[in-house]
Image (spheres, rainbow, N blue to C red):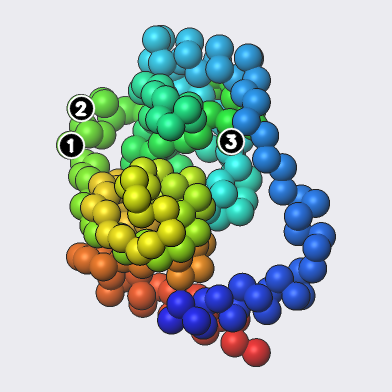
Amino acid sequence: MALEINALINKLSNVVGSSITSRISNTDEVSASIRSTLTDAISRRQRVEITYHSIARDSVTTRTILPLDSQINNEVEYILAFCEHSHSHRTFRLDRILSARISQTPMIEKSLNEMSDEIGKLTTTISISSRHRDVNEILNIQIPAGDVSGSFQVNIEVFSQDWLTRAVMSLGGAATVSQPLAASVAQRASKALLGYKI
């Protein structure tokens, strides 16, 4: 399957050409107003409407979140939040949030405790063979010392099987799911590949 994915990536790259790179912006700068809005929302338990650039999906979406906390991991700032669009907890890179404003719509009825009870973490094993930097960026996996160029496995916890499937597929065979969600990811990848057969 990895060979098919890589062949598809090459085929799409030839069709799209170099114009795709002109649409990609890589900025680590975070707007002071966005940071301030999210910090205030965390302390006041307010909902925020954000515009977010997802690298895994290569798309920009607008969604309403309830920011719960912020953290720094590998010198990257993250916002931990409950996302109403996906009805689950999500982690958003602060430098990928393009805009943020306090939501004026009423609060959803569920309490934070109810949300936490409904959302369970899934633990899975990921095999990583290449593109370590991309894997670290998309899956937020710390690369073990000494394994910079080799293959290795790591256990991770995720909130969403759909997110995991999209993230692994976006890595084009550089990472594969070993267990226990491997069958689901493989099935979705095969279905996606069928859509590109010409």
Return the residue at label 3. 96
Amino acid type at circle 2 is: Asn
Return the residue at label 2. 113
Q: Is residue 183 left or right of residue 24?
A: left
Rendered location of residue 129, percent (x, y): 40, 65
- On the image, which quarter does residue 107 sit in? top left
Toward the left, the furthest residue is 117
Mark 1 vs mark 3, CA separation in Å: 28 Å
What residue sits 59% from the left and 81% below the top? 7
Return the residue at label 1. 117
- The mark total stands at 3
Above/below status of 48 relative to 154: above
Mark 2 element type: helix
Q: Quadrant of the C terminus?
A: bottom right
What residue sits 36% from the left and 77% below the top? 187
Mark 2 vs mark 1, CA separation in Å: 6 Å
Amino acid type at circle 3 is: Arg
Q: Is residue 105 visible?
A: no
Tag 2–tag 1 contact (CB < 8 Å): yes
Q: Residues within 10 Å of mark 1 (few under 14, many from 20)?
A: few
Sequence-earlier tag: 1 or 3: 3
Q: Is residue 23 left or right of residue 137?
A: right
